[in-house]
Amino acid sequence: MMWSTFIKALAVISLARAGSASIYSSDFVLKSSTQPPAGWQATGFPSPSHLITLRIALAQPNLPLLEQHLLQIANPSHARWREHLTKEEVDDLTAPSQEALGAVDSWLAEFGLDVDVHPTERTSANDWLVVHDVPISTAERLLNTTYSIFTHSETGKQVVRTTSYRVPAAVDEYVDVVQPTDYFGVGIKPLSSGFTFEEESASATTFNITLSQLKELYGITGYTPSGKHSRVGVTGYLEQYANLNDLELFYETFLPQAANTTLTVKLINGANNSQNPADAGGEAELDVQWAGGVSWPIPNTFYSTYGRGQNTNPNISYEDNGNEPYDVFLTYLLSQPSSQLPQTLTTSYAEAESDVPLNYARKVCALYAAVGARGVSALHSSGDGGVGNGDSTTPCYTPNKFAALFPPSCPYVTAVGGTYLIPETAVSFSGGGFSDYFPRQFWQDSAVDKYLNTQLKGTYKGLFNATGRGIPDIAAQSVRFNIIYQGKVALISGTSASCPAFAGVVALLNDALVSKGKKPLGWLNPWIYSLKTGFNDITTGSNPGCATPGFNATVGWDPVTGFGTPNFPELLKQLV
């Protein structure tokens, strides 16, 4: 009798599983489909046993409410201005539904990826599910797709990707993104140009910028920061290492009072912290030296995120690049208690918006909204390609279209363009333009409409999206910054220089607020666009590209330098 009962129980379980399998193994819905970015070609197929890490972004039904809160918190005319949300409040507003969690767990279990047994992680808000050690063969069945090895024609680098994927209709409404699939993630690059070494930078006959010159130019020298209760975050991707000996030498050379200042390093997703001088990354050196130099003595933290998934099969030479750095870093940041968050965050990495699948870009932008709601001012370099690829004599990167960069095109980050010389003028490589992914928000309407109606008057019609988010928002010096690289003085240019410099200014503003018991600025953009003063308006120069002269700088906002460069005393007056 007991054996008969056992057999019946097994039959019930089998039927349940069979029914479950039917809804997860058929009726697939196309989730995303795209073409490989320029230069990538399918050259073969990965081993079915090759392991990847899948990151599944779940739908967030309360995301519109989070954005509503954020618009109030960031509005200087609203009673809630700078009343940032707690970690728990943001987690609640970004969490998926219980139905979504149950459905996705069942879907994974059907393909042998039971979250109670298989190596799996969830983010703080349960909005991202990370499933480790997934064989390619399983991922292909899970997503009704075929993975290929893609090889880049110039670099020879190989990655495992697909150009489209599907999910069962039963989970379609609950799943927003699955990666790695159609996001190649290898177009991400530091936005800085090459180095020029000189024995004595001060003797250079061409224009260059030292720390003291920049502080004097923007009126910072008269302010003494408290350096307490706030911090600056510097983002590091692509195995860019910040050498601590170089940082110490930078301070000794250009800011002696900061000698012996320490840099906190946070390693994310298995990142390393190599201090071998040969491994020093020019981008990382520039970012930590200038963000730290401008904001000193405010503590700085370097967040090094390993964004390339480990190849777990030693017999396979290609990289799987399974972990895309943006969401990995931002979900880590959002998992931290408020006491551990930086109030200012600078990032000097980006890629062409058209190289990023729309659904993934939207999820990353939503993460930036959550970061802003937590009280973090996130700044991004706007790019070094002008309106296209930086060469006014060659065609557009995207055929017949100017190129905006992502994440700067996300409205929840502040995009920083570039200037040079004194008096300042727009630098020709300053990335600027209009997003094809993100519509312009109301706080930009007046400034952008004025530029479109009085300056362009239909020029470049069809080459850009006139209703898209306009970038940059502001700008700073960006040419020939003095840094220490591998023990020597070097000069480096790019909006990678302007972003940490401007972030240092924002850090000082946050310091002034926090030291008086007030809340930090958080998401900056609505405040920036509400100001009547506070910036040095840049009215000369342009950003050529795509066989055009590009946009021109002019009075007020423009898609080359935004509202201009910081006038620190005036900005401080607006706040304190």
Image: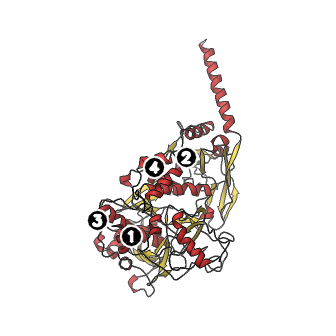
Q: Earlier in the sequence, mark 4 or mark 2?
A: 2
Closer to us: mark 3 or mark 2?
2
Looking at the figure, which quarter contains the C terminus? bottom left
Q: Which residue is mark 2?
A: 61
Measured in 3D between alpha carbons, the distance from the residue under mark 1 to the one under mark 2, in whole angstroms, is 36 Å
CB under 8 Å between callouts 4 and 2?
no
Q: Secondary structure at mark 3?
A: loop
Question: Label 3 sits on what residue type?
Answer: Ser
* Residue that appears at 36% across and 61% down: 231
| Residue 32 x, y percent position in the rendering | 66, 53
First reached walking from the N terminus: tag 1 or tag 2: 2
Looking at the image, tell me whether mark 4 or mark 3 is earlier in sequence order.
Answer: 4
Specify the label residue 505 is tagged with.
1
Query: Which residue, given by chain and number where applicable, does mark 4 sit on?
Result: 90
Q: Residues within 10 Å of mark 3 (few under 14, many from 20)?
A: some
> Which residue bears the numbered disc 3?
226
Q: Earlier in the sequence, mark 3 or mark 2?
A: 2
> Is 58 drawn above or below residue 408 in the view shown?
above
Instruction: Please provide percent x and percent y for residue 192.
Output: 50, 72
Contact flag, marks 1 and 4 (Cβ < 8 Å): no
Q: Is residue 355 left or right of residue 425?
A: right
Mark whose residue sits in front, 1 or 2? 2
Measure how far apart labels 3 and 2 are at the Cα level. 41 Å
Instruction: Identify the amino acid type marked 4.
Output: Val
Residue 434 pos. (x, y %)? 59, 68
Which comes before the other along the chain, label 3 or label 1? Answer: 3
Query: Residue sitting at 33 percent across and 68 percent down?
Result: 296
